[in-house]
Image: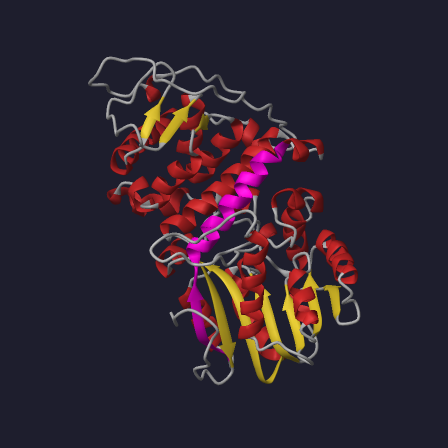
């Protein structure tokens, strides 16, 4: 690995004497397995880009009120004692990664232990609050020359989709059970609202929040006795169980073999095996006609090139008079357009092949079929709280994850993924919507919230 000795690229101009900044004890730098994490193990050498990265970092820190802590130096800007902290343990490696890889390099620096923060979510929230501030306005046109495009091998084609899903959802059912609640639901919960405050989210209340979310979706789709329901994206089976308990006949599709096995077992244990069937099947291969279709946070894995085919499939399988209830993570339309052809750290290490849509993109794409978005209810702050609970539990139960064979780089990868996602929802960079789609586009009263 390249030496991390401090060089001129990390010598910030100081207006105050250099003093050692007080720091909490750092975790040991992780041992990086180059076979498993080749780009984390490799530190690039790009002095000019590192120098530019140093200037951009200082500018962004000043604009966002972030305290920079380097070995043996104190941030002369002094943004205040409550400022979020970016603590650089290996400044040279950090800047060379950042200068070469941009935000992918920023993430790989965290995986490698080059930087830390006593409150990563506060730091990431400050960065996510104004992402445009990270790149000087006059240089943004250069972006197209240095950002990477997603590799074709990760496009969610029928041939690639199962492999993409396998990389995330087939990590280990035991791993997900460590930080999810007993419902094994891996999507935003819906907590009781506290007027004028963030949702009242507690670990004990998370199972009820997940059931509240599921029940609202089933209500949107008018699922009841005798409903023929198609679920696209099984998860670990909780929605199928609750729909079957209402008297529906459920067919649920998944591409995850791990989820398939556990969902079938959970459905059987709930006594609903005669009403709910789980199939290992791509959504494009769905057959039959259904009174209702429900899909929870699955569209994000589809990928923008395949959204038309996704909505065409929904239209094809929906029986006359049927209803579709979707739950989708969304982002503002302009940001979606800017990121839609960019290879991000999340795509590289967490969710290959995905793309978060905008509400406008969903509406416009659905409209090319016979479908119309009738209702769109947002509850992003609830996702921030869901992620906080998952992140806290993941941290607490890490020793058990390590015993399953996951290494320290994986731990830091998931810490950053969960923290980054939480920050996105806290700032509004990300949102989550429950959507009702019908064929006639007529206004249909929904169970909660205001129409977006």
Whether residue 171 is situated above or below residue 408 in the rendered picture: below
| Residue 148, magenta (yes or no) | no
The part of the chain drawn in magenta is 371-398
| Residue 387, magenta (yes or no) | yes
Prevalent SS, magenta region = helix
Q: Residue at x 34, y 40 (%)?
A: 126
> Is residue 114 shown left or right of residue 236?
left
Q: Examine the rendering and report whether any part of residue 90 can be seen.
A: yes
Q: Quadrant of the N terminus?
A: top right
Q: Residue 230, percent across and down?
A: 66, 72
Which quadrant of the figure has residue 247? bottom right
Q: Residue 172, percent across and down?
A: 70, 44
Q: Quadrant of the C terminus?
A: bottom left
Q: Nearer the viewer, residue 67 or 36?
A: 67
Q: Examine the rendering and report whether any part of residue 46 can be seen.
A: no
Q: Residue at x 54, y 71 (%)?
A: 325
Report the number of numbered marks: 0
Q: Residue at x 64, y 62 (%)?
A: 233
Q: Residue 265, percent across and down?
A: 78, 57
Q: Residue at x 61, y 50 (%)?
A: 153
Which quadrant of the figure has residue 41? top right
> Is residue 239 shown left or right of residue 303?
right
Whether residue 127 is situated above or below residue 287 in the rendered picture: above
Q: Nearer the viewer, residue 156 or 411?
A: 411
> Is residue 60 shown left or right of residue 89?
left
Q: Nearer the viewer, residue 352 or 319?
A: 319
């Amino acid at each position: 690995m390249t030496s991390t000795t401090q060089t001129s690229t990390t010598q910030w101009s100081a207006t105050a004497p250099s003093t050692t900044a007080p720091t909490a004890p750092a975790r040991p730098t992780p041992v990086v397995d180059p076979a498993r994490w080749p780009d984390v193990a490799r530190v690039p050498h790009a002095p000019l880009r590192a120098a530019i990265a140093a200037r951009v970092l200082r500018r962004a820190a000043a604009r966002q009120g972030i305290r920079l802590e380097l070995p043996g130096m104190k941030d002369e800007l002094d943004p205040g004692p409550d400022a979020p902290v970016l603590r650089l343990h290996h400044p040279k490696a950090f800047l060379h990664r950042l200068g070469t890889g941009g935000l992918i390099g920023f993430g790989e620096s965290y995986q490698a232990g080059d930087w830390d923060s006593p409150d990563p979510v506060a730091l990431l929230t400050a960065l996510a609050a104004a992402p445009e501030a990270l790149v000087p306005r006059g240089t943004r046109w250069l972006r197209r020359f240095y950002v990477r495009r997603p590799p074709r091998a990760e496009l969610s084609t029928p041939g690639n989709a199962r492999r993409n899903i396998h990389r995330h959802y087939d990590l280990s059912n035991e791993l997900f059970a460590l930080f999810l609640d007993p419902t094994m639901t891996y999507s935003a919960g819906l907590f009781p609202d506290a007027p004028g405050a963030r949702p009242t989210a507690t670990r004990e209340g998370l199972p009820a929040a997940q059931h509240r979310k599921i029940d609202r979706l089933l209500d949107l789709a008018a699922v009841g006795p005798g409903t023929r329901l198609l679920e696209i994206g099984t998860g670990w089976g909780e929605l199928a169980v609750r729909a079957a308990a209402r008297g529906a006949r459920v067919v649920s599709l998944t591409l995850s073999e791990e989820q398939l096995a556990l969902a079938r077992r959970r459905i059987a244990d709930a006594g609903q095996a005669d009403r709910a069937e789980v199939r290992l099947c791509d959504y494009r291969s769905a057959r039959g006609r259904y009174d209702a279709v429900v899909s929870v946070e699955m569209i994000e894995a589809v990928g923008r090139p395949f959204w038309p085919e996704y909505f065409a499939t929904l239209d094809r399988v929906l029986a006359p008079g049927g209803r579709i209830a979707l739950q989708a993570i969304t982002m503002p339309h302009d940001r979606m357009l800017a990121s839609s052809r960019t290879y991000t750290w999340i795509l590289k290490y967490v969710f290959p092949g995905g793309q978060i849509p905008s509400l406008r993109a969903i509406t416009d794409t659905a409209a090319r079929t016979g479908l119309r978005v009738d209702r769109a209810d947002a509850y992003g702050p609830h996702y921030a709280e869901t992620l906080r609970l998952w992140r806290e539990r993941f941290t607490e139960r890490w020793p058990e994850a390590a015993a399953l064979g996951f290494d320290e780089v994986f731990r830091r990868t998931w810490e950053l993924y969960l923290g980054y996602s939480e920050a996105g929802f806290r700032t509004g960079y990300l949102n989550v919507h429950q959507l009702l789609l019908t064929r006639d586009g007529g206004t249909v009263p929904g169970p909660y919230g205001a129409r977006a």
